[in-house]
Structures are given as C-alpha cells and as structure tokens.
Amino acid sequence: MDPRTKFQLAINEFEQRQRAGRLLIAEGARELELAERKRAEGHGHRFSVARALRKMTATGGGGLNENDGIEGEVCAEAARQSGGSHDRNRIVIPLHLLATRALTVAQGTDGGYLAAQSDRPFVVDLLRPYSVTARLGVRVVPSLKSSFSIPRTSAAATAGWPANETTQAGDSSPTLGTVAMAPKAVGAHITISGQLLLQSPQLVDELVTTNLLLGVGGVLDKAVLAGTGAPGPTGVLNTTGVGTNSGSTLAWAGLGTMLESAGTANVNDDNITVLTTPTVRKLLQGRETAAGAGPVWVNNTVAGKRAVVSSDVPSGVMFMGDFGQVLVGIWGAGLVVEHDPYTGFRSGQHGYRCILHADVGVLNPAAFQVCTSIT
C-alpha cells in the first residue's frame, strides 16, 4: 500500500471515530436532559417568582438558599453565570423566566434554564409589551460578559467609474468610529403586599412579573431616548451627530424638513417612525397640514409615517428615525432582586430593589432627527 493511500485511510478512520464520538455525546446529553427534567418535576414543575420572593421575605431572614428547590438552583446558577456567587437575600432572576411561557420546566437546572434558548430575540419579545422602544425595533443583546466597542462608519468610502482598464481607481477610505458600551447599573424599587405573596402562585407570578417588567421597560425607554451619560447611558437625544430641529410652532413644513434631512442621510424610508408625547399628539391633531386639508396627525401617522406616543418621552420632544439603529446591551444572566426589610414593615408590605446592568449605543446617529421645545 503506497504512503498516500495509507495516509488517506488513516484520515478516514479518524473522521469515523469523531462522528461516533459526537453521536455518543449527543445521546448522553439527551439522557442527561431527561434525567434533569424528572428531577425538576420533583421540585414542583415550575420556576415561581412568587416562591423565590416569599423565601427572601420569610420570618427569620433565611433568604433563598441554593437548595430551596428549582428557584434556589436556578438563581444560584444565574449568579455564577453573572460572575458572582449566590446571595440568598440578593438573587439573580434570569430575564427569560419572567415570561409566562418560560415558566414551565423545559431544560436542566445546571445552566439549561439560562443558556439553552436563543435569548436575543426572546428578550426583545419579552420587553415589547412593556417598552415602546422595544416595539419600535431597538436591538437588544443580552447575557453580555464584558465591555466592548462596535466599529461604525461615520463617512462612507466613495466609488468612481474608471475610464478604462488602465485607469487607476482613486484612493478613498471610509471614516471609522466606534460605539463603546459598558455595563451601567440602573435600579428601580417596587412594593408588593405580603398578602399577595400568599395567594395562588400563578396569579402572583403574573402580577409580580408584570410589575418587574414594567419597571425594566420604563427604565430602558428613558435611557434609550434621553439618557444623559455618566453615570448612566447616553440616549438618542444627547448623542452627537443626531439631527436637531426647532419645535417652535411645529407644523407640516417643519415635519417635511425633518423627513428631508432623514432622506439626505440615507435612512431607510420604510423604517422611519415618529415618537413623541401625548401632549404633542394632541397639538398636531388640532393643527392642519394646510387650510381645510386635514390634521397633521391622523390615524396614528404623521407625514405618512407610523406615529406613536409614550409618557417616557421628554416633554415637548419628538423623535423621527430608525430605532433599529439603537443597540441595548444587557450584562449578566438576569435581573438582580434585593429584599428591602424596612419598607412597609408596619403595614405588611415588602419592598424590593431591582437592578439591571445595561447600556445604550446609537449605531448611526444620522438615522435620527429630534425636534425639541415643541409649541
């Protein structure tokens, strides 16, 4: 047998062993998953936010220990994946477990609850009912581990048509920049009745998770739209390079100028959305495009673009642009929830401080036009 043939046979044998090994690993993983499911079912089938909070507020201050069923195991693993250790009075709840559809046991507790799902689109779906900017298409990247920078082009390279095959193409390089993002802590405080925590776990889970997600969604909206920078994120309103417009007696002509500026910046026309306050909407509903031609704001559109409102928009401000050019990064495995033993002590209320580590980056500031001091 010649050396070449012998070498090829050795490669073929090695590849066959690799395939057999992968099959054995896959089979073992399936058996482990089934075993973990059965073990989780023995704990009560579901991860319950209510049970976790009850353990944290139990008389005697025992907190949620790592061996307290599914809740203890999952929160302990979430703390480890966030780079820390489990604290029984300061737990980490994975974001995807705050959704009703994620409460049923489907993965093993040794990290499966945290990483087995494609959670990037899932977190956006989770926040959409509670965050107007999530509904408008901001990109959310969860489960980050460290700070990072994203390159962006602030001026594109120019191209030309050479006269013939001997003509050299002119030198033209794009102007590059970066969007630096780092974890920034944002906190909210919620109060929950002690009696509520004693009710049906399913009812409590729905009410508590709604409260938590409303808090998270509202905080992220404020950061995306008008974050002022250190120590928090810098939002669209305060990002260098965003188009600015006067809102004095805002009318049809001013909105046309904003759309023209967006088009000049090559913003995808199909992705442009208008976001403002309920007060500005009322103003534009009573202001005509021209005498007898109908209102500026009609059927939730402005100048043919989808128009929505939110109380999280600063007073007298309107945003027009492509919200898909905003990136929201979320660090760690989930939401940090800490029991406040003092708030509502006499009345039987329980206070919880919720902390999320996040940051906002505007990938293309020219994708936005902002109008301020609207009258």
Image: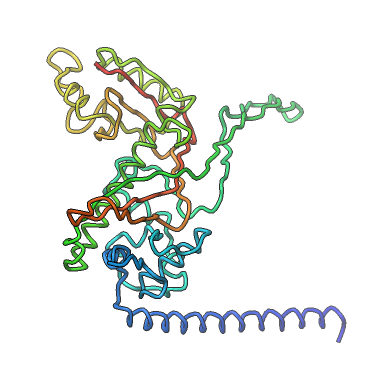
Q: Position of residue 366 (x, y in %)?
A: 46, 27
Q: Residue furthest left?
A: 292
Answer left or right for 120 relative to 3. Answer: left
Q: Position of residue 212 (x, y in %)?
A: 29, 52
Q: Quadrant of residue 73?
A: bottom left
Q: Position of residue 301 (x, y in %)?
A: 23, 31
Q: Is residue 241 above or below residue 336?
A: above
Residue shown at the point (77%, 82%) measured from the top left: 10
Query: Which corner quadrant holds the N terminus?
Result: bottom right
Front-most of 325 and 188?
Answer: 188
Answer left or right for 99 relative to 323. Answer: left
Residue shown at the point (51%, 52%) measured from the top left: 144
Front-most of 173 and 274?
Answer: 274
Front-most of 267 and 184?
Answer: 184
Residue shown at the point (30%, 51%) measured from the top left: 213
Residue shown at the point (36%, 67%) measured from the top left: 64
Query: Which corner quadrant holds the C terminus?
Result: top left
Answer left or right for 262 relative to 205. Answer: right
Q: Quadrant of residue 210?
A: bottom left
Q: Position of residue 23 (x, y in %)?
A: 56, 82
Count of number-bearing discs: 0
Which of the colour schemes (rainbow, by chain, secondary structure, one colour) is used? rainbow
